[in-house]
Amino acid sequence: MKLVKKFRLDEMCVAPRILHIRAGLSTIVPWNEIQTLFGENDLELKVCGQSKIDLDLLKKYTIYQVGLSSEDPHIKIFWTVLENFDAQQRQRFVKFACNQVRP
C-alpha cells in the first residue's frame, strides 16, 4: 500500500507541493507544534477540505450560460446522473470538468 501511495504522489508531482505547503505553514507555526495540534487527517481536512463532493453545494453555486437554467430538461438529467454517481465517480467527474483533483 505504501508503494501505491508513493506512486500516486509522484504521479501527480504532489510531493514537492506538499513540501512547499509544509515550508509555508512552518513560517507561521513551528512544524512540531502543527503536528501536536493536528492529527494527519485533521490537517488534511483543514488544507484540502472534504473529499466528498457536496452536490447541493455544487448546484447552489453553479452558474449557467446565458439561455440555460436549472429547469432545462438536459440540466435536470445531468444532475440526476451526478446524484447516481458514487463518491469516486463524482471525484473523477470534478477532475474531468475542472482539472482539479480532490484528495
Image (cartoon, grey):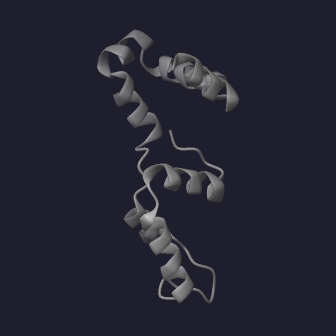
Instruction: Using residue 7 as the reference point, say whether residue 89 is left or right of it.
Output: left
The relative height of residue 25 versus residue 45 in the rendered view (above or below) is: above
The relative height of residue 4 versus residue 52 in the rendered view (above or below) is: above
**Residue at screen point 57% across, 78% down:** 64
Quarter holding residue 37 = top left
Residue 26 in the image: state x and y as whole percent: 49, 17
**Residue at screen point 53% across, 80% down:** 75
The relative height of residue 49 versus residue 72 in the rendered view (above or below) is: above
Give the number of marks: 0
Residue 16 in the image: state x and y as whole percent: 66, 22
Q: Residue furthest top?
A: 32
Residue 36 in the image: state x and y as whole percent: 31, 14
Q: For this rendering, which residue is in front, 2 or 41?
A: 2
Instruction: Using residue 57 as the reference point, say whether residue 65 is left or right of it.
Output: right
Quarter holding residue 86 = bottom left
**Residue at screen point 52% across, 44% down:** 102
The relative height of residue 52 versus residue 1 in the rendered view (above or below) is: below
**Residue at screen point 55% across, 24% down:** 5
Q: Residue furthest left?
A: 37
Residue 3 in the image: state x and y as whole percent: 58, 18
